Amino acid sequence: MLKTLKQFGFGKNFIEWVNIIYLKPVSSILTNSDRSQSFELKRGVRQGDPLSPLLFDITLEPLTTIIAVEFNGGVVLGSDSRVSAGETVVNRVMNKLSLLHDKIYCALSGSAADAQTIAEMVNYQLDVHSIEIGEDPQVRSAATLVKNISYKYKEELSAHLIVAGWDRRGGGQVFVTLNGLLSRQPFAVGGSGSSYVYGFVDAEYQKGMSKEDCQQFVVNTISLAMSRDGSSGGVAYLVTIDEKGAEEKCILGNELPTFYDQ
């Protein structure tokens, strides 16, 4: 946690105070004005501690594997489900595919708190935007909102979102956004696990793949990354979006394809 605070640019004095407070926390019990002797807390923190939830959010890092791919008529998004705080796995089944609008989703990576905050802000703005224009928003509009927020707060936020969805003007679309970048791609991968699968996706992706082929492509990519990357794991979440709407699916770990070294 202290290393994470240092990387985020917190001052030396603040980090020292956090270290003093949480290194060996002590507490006492007050009963009818009688206070017990102080004792060391072996697990957890003091009751009502206002700082610990914020520190917990800061240190949550979904080192992850996310992917999105276009097919003729829609898109498929996928992610693993493991969330880590340092070297500790704090959530094994987090869904990192966040709804932005009825037919637009984003895949989250980076700081969990930052990524979820961006997704919630964009979700609210898209709801207002769709009411103003009287129709569903475009995928590019959602991606542009993500890009603008990411660039405006690039010094404060640590998050990377892949935005994908379907609209009546552009069909299925995938956009990558990072620190002001906005680029449409036929497919995109991100997160710590992506380093292990770049060669696989470059070799296996084919233009014009069907919906079923894209779904299998996403599942294979996530499964391979999970088997190589220690920060990716759990289950695989999939979302398939087309003109009819969005279909969500969860694939358990024992149902994922297995890859072996040759």
Image (cartoon, helix red, strand yellow):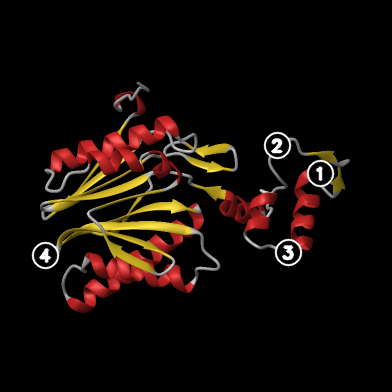
**SS at circle 4:** loop
Residue depicted at 45% across the width and 61% down the height: 117
Amino acid type assigned to the residue bearing label 2 in the image: Arg
| Mark 4 nearby-residue class (10 Å; few <14, some 14–19, many ≥20) | few
Q: Residue at x 25, y 68 (%)?
A: 140
Horizontal and vertical percent position of residue 126: 29, 69
Q: Are marks 4 and 2 in contact (CB under 8 Å)?
A: no
Q: Residues within 10 Å of mark 1 (few under 14, many from 20)?
A: some
- Quote the CA–CA distance across marks 1 and 3: 25 Å
Could you say where residue 151 lies in the image, as x and y percent from the top left?
A: 44, 71
Q: Which residue is mark 3?
A: 11
Q: CA distance from mark 2 to mark 3?
A: 27 Å
Work out whether mark 1 precedes mark 4 in sequence or the reverse, and give the earlier one.
1
The residue where tag 2 is placed is 43
Q: Quadrant of the C terminus?
A: top left
Give the residue pinned by disc 1. Answer: 26
Q: Given contact means CB atoms under 8 Å apart, are the residues at marks 1 and 4 in contact? A: no
Query: What's the residue type where badge 4 is placed?
Result: Arg
Task: Identify the residue at horizontal 87%, vertical 46% (top origin).
Answer: 34
Q: Say which residue label 4 marks.
A: 168
